[in-house]
Image (cartoon, helix red, strand yellow):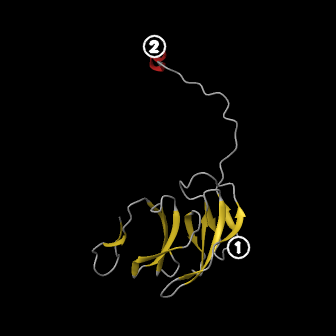
Amino acid sequence: MVYLLPTTGDPKPRLLVATPGIADGFRFSPDSQWIAWASNDSGKFEVYVASLSAPANRRQVSIGGGAQPAWRNDGKELFYLTQEGKLMAVELKPGSPLQADAPKPLFQSNATGSYVGEVYAPSAGGRRFLFAEPENRDAGNINVVVNWDAGLRRGK
């Protein structure tokens, strides 16, 4: 369950999303009228969009899995990552009901395997993307020292 706590007016929390699974990556649209998130209600993570005035009327916008939604600054496009690390874009036409075009692949990233944490951010116009990538280092040897405190006592 995810609740929305208003910062003005009646401070009573209201139910935003009721889900039997995991819901993650909530992002408000630039005009604060819509919300996007990922949930595994179907057995795999998919990206959903709903109006804040009627969040129960959600619309799935990803196909074949998706997570980490991010809005373009005008709210007319939503980006997300597939499990394979492909960055996808969905054009949106807000209204009642929300209209969403079929997702289009933009490019393959190196962000694969895990949806933990935010690994990318779009520029305001959605033409450039910044990705966080792990540093490729040879870990080398790992030394584990046991009973190290006994060595400290001998040195006294």
Residue 155 screen position, x and y as percent: 49, 13
The Cα atoms of the two marked residues, 1 and 2, are separated by 63 Å
What amino acid is found at the position of numbered circle 2 in the picture?
Lys
Quadrant containing the N terminus in the rendered view: bottom left
Residue 92 in the figure: left or right of residue 22: right
Of residue 102 and residue 141, the one placed in the foreground of this image is 102
Indicate which label's residue lies in the foreground, 1 or 2.
1
Image quadrant of residue 56? Answer: bottom left
Of residue 72 and residue 109, the one placed in the foreground of this image is 109
Residue 72 screen position, x and y as percent: 61, 76
| Mark 1 / mark 2, whichever is N-terminal | 1
Looking at the rendered structure, the secondary structure element under dot 2 is: loop
- Residue drawn at the location 68% of the way across and 66% of the way down: 129
- Disc on res. 20: none
- Residue drawn at the location 68% of the way across and 30% of the way down: 140
Extreme residue in the bottom direction: 96
Are discs 1 and 2 less than 8 Å apart at CB? Answer: no
- Disc on res. 156: 2
Of residue 150 and residue 155, the one placed in the foreground of this image is 150
What amino acid is found at the position of numbered circle 1 in the picture?
Arg
- Residue drawn at the location 65% of the way across and 68% of the way down: 88
Residue 8 in the figure: left or right of residue 117: left
Q: Is residue 135 depicted above or below 67 in this figure?
A: above
- Please rate how many residues cluster around mark 1, counting C-alpha atoms within 10 Å: few if below 14, some from 14 to 19, many from 20: few
- Residue drawn at the location 69% of the way across and 54% of the way down: 110
- Please rate how many residues cluster around mark 2, counting C-alpha atoms within 10 Å: few if below 14, some from 14 to 19, many from 20: few
Q: Is residue 55 depicted above or below 146 in this figure?
A: below
Looking at the rendered structure, the secondary structure element under dot 1 is: loop
Residue 25 screen position, x and y as percent: 49, 64
Q: According to the image, label 1 marks what residue?
A: 127
Image quadrant of residue 12? Answer: bottom left
